[in-house]
Amino acid sequence: MSLTKTTKLILIISSSFILVGAAIATPTTLVLLNKNKEINFTLLENAGVMIEAKGLRIYVDPINLPDNYSDLPADAILITHGHGDHYQSNVMTMLQKEDTLNVFPAIYDTYVALFDGLAVVPGDSFQVGSIEVTCFYMYTFAPPGYDASHAQADNYTSYLIDIDGFTFFHAGDSGNIPEYSELNGLVDVALMPLGPGCQTMADMDIVYALDAIDPSYFVPIHFVAGAESTFCETYRTSIENLNCEIVQLSHFSSRTFSP
């Protein structure tokens, strides 16, 4: 697959101007989303993230959200795959507003029907307002004698989220797949899973994946509390030698990017 940043399959227009306020377990800084070019990024639980930019709020794989997140509804929710640590229907319901775009891998036709969603496969692109999202591969490899927990044939999706040329890549539960070489030069912030379990990438595989993708920033996702510190202590030098800055966040903490 050859990616471009101009492919558009669907246009979702949002004209709402949103003021995001602090609450329990949410960012403590007020961000008037339509007044500046800053991107507010929040790491949620496990692989969940929230990205706020250009007056829009996009979630990827949100789970186990505090009740006050009902005050932070989604313009779009992107689901990489349907495993319980990446998809929860009650959280999806909590984040809905009238025009929320709900995106699922096409294999989940039941979820698509339940949330009047958009079914996608790797290679598809769509718009959330002026933010472009491109679906990419997400699969893992199985040890000998076992089936992969994320089979390539299922067409699960990772996501490239392009905000005026500043691009986040959410890898979901992917392993270190050869297609990452296609992303070289396209990604500013790589969100990569640390594990454990689910046959995601781990340890030096993450470093090799970052080397292939060549992002400016790396944010660890999909970890149990404390594992991110151990990983960063172990591999900091290897990652920084790639000219990649580690952005280490605990769950429900935030970082502002200013492209």
Image (cartoon, grey):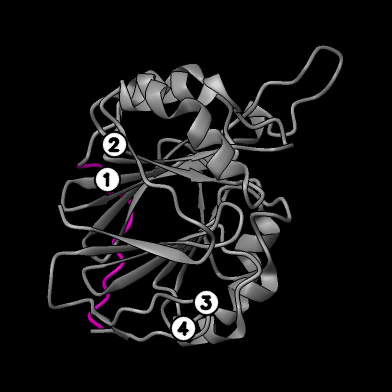
CA gap between label 3 and label 4 equals: 21 Å
Element at label 3: loop
- Above or below, 204 relative to 129: above
Nearest the eye: 222 or 170: 222
Which residue has dot 2 on it? 187
Q: Quadrant of residue 255?
A: bottom left
Which residue has dot 3 on it? 25
CA gap between label 1 and label 2 equals: 5 Å
Rendered location of residue 194, percent (x, y): 58, 37
- Of mark 4 and mark 2, the one earlier in the sequence is 4
Element at label 1: strand
Q: Which mark is residue 97?
A: 4
CA gap between label 1 and label 4 equals: 25 Å
User: Which amino acid lies under the numbered mark 4 shown in the image of this protein?
Assistant: Lys
Question: Is 7 in the magenta?
Answer: yes
Q: Is residue 111 left or right of residue 257?
A: right
Which residue has dot 1 on it? 167
Rendered location of residue 258, percent (x, y): 17, 57
Write the residue at 52% across / 83% down. Answer: 24
Write the residue at 52% across / 28% down. Answer: 234
Task: Tell which tag, 4 or 2, sits nearer the viewer.
Answer: 2
Nearest the eye: 10 or 143: 143
- Which residues fall within the magenta stretch? 6-16
